[in-house]
Image (cartoon, rainbow, N blue to C red):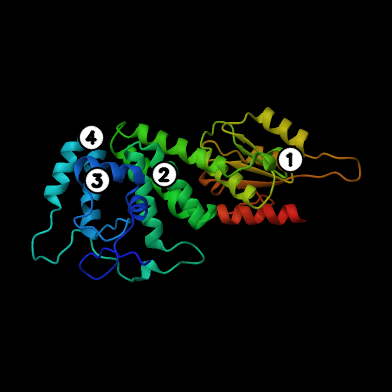
Amino acid sequence: MKVSQEVDGTGAPGLTTGEVARRLGVAPTTIRSWHHRYGLGPDTHAGGRHRRWTEVDVARLERMCVLTGRGVPAAEAARLARVTTAPVAGDARRTSRPPSRSRSEVPQAGGPPIAEARRDSRAVARAALRLDAAALDELLESAIDRHGLVEAWGEVISPTLRAVGRKWERSGERYVEVEHFLSWHVSGALRRRTPAAVADRSAAALLACVPGENHTLPLEALAAALAEHGVPVRMFGAAVPVESLTAAVRRTGPAVVALWAQSRATASRPLADHVATMEWGVRGARRRPMVMTLGPGWSGRTSAGLLRPPGLAEAVAEVRAIVAC
């Protein structure tokens, strides 16, 4: 039996509750709750069990998201959302423009369409601003599933982290809890993509932040991306002391050592050069690791013989090539 669909006045089918949830960065249960508690459901209903949302309906929910994100109580936010987005009888205008086919909708160089990635990024940011853990986890998992981990990191997650960081910088300490909240959930999503069975085997790649460096998320993204390709990794995380780093390299004998530095103050070329000269194995068959310098801190500070991939995709390709040799 064919389910009838609601249209938004332009003849286009309406959105499902799940599609609206992804677009706005809220959990589907939140939308259903707003509908039942505050009457923020579709203005009209289609036949069948599946609810469809028009552009006007979505605009009302968008207004609800903005208001609740500013701390307005939900009941008052719902009242304001209904007033400020109510359509005028006989007026064909809509508060949100209907989708149009534009250059930004065309997939770029194997990645997700730019407009789709931007929508996902905005949805993740909204969920983080509301401190909505359930929605944030769902949106992150969905973005990784649909775009792939590398593209989701480059086009959705990393831009959102930068945007939240800029918001915090511009507003003093007001949004520090949002940045920490978002970082924690991104870390969780990445770790769920790193199977323990892969991490526990004899690791081909050792990943560590240099001493004094606490930004681990880019390395966690690399660990998860390598794990997707079956490359075993050993992650040491933030601010690894020099002695601990060299001891770990000597004990595990990795093919690749990836060192992350976010700032020039923490990037140490002598450390990278030293790790690159370390040897292990029996006489006559000694081996050295390939050292990969990652992060903006290494800009202009690396030496000949050290790998310097510009992004996550290139880092994954470099490691896979070395391991395959």
Answer with mark 3 or mark 4, whichever residue precedes in sequence: 3
Q: CA distance from mark 2 to mark 1?
A: 31 Å
Q: Is residue 53 left or right of residue 89?
A: right
Answer with mark 2 or mark 1, whichever residue precedes in sequence: 2
The residue under the point 82% across, 39% down is 280
**Residue flagged by tag 4: what amino acid is it?**
Gly
Label 2: which secondary element = helix
Q: Position of residue 12 (x, y in %)?
A: 28, 68
Q: Is residue 281 left or right of residue 316?
A: right
Between circles 4 and 2, the one closer to the viewer is 4
Label 3: which secondary element = helix
Q: CA distance from mark 3 to mark 2?
A: 31 Å
Q: What residue is shown with label 3?
A: 35
**Residue flagged by tag 2: what amino acid is it?**
Leu
Between circles 3 and 2, the one closer to the viewer is 3
Q: What residue is shown with label 1?
A: 201
Q: What residue is shown with label 2?
A: 161
Q: What residue is shown with label 4?
A: 71
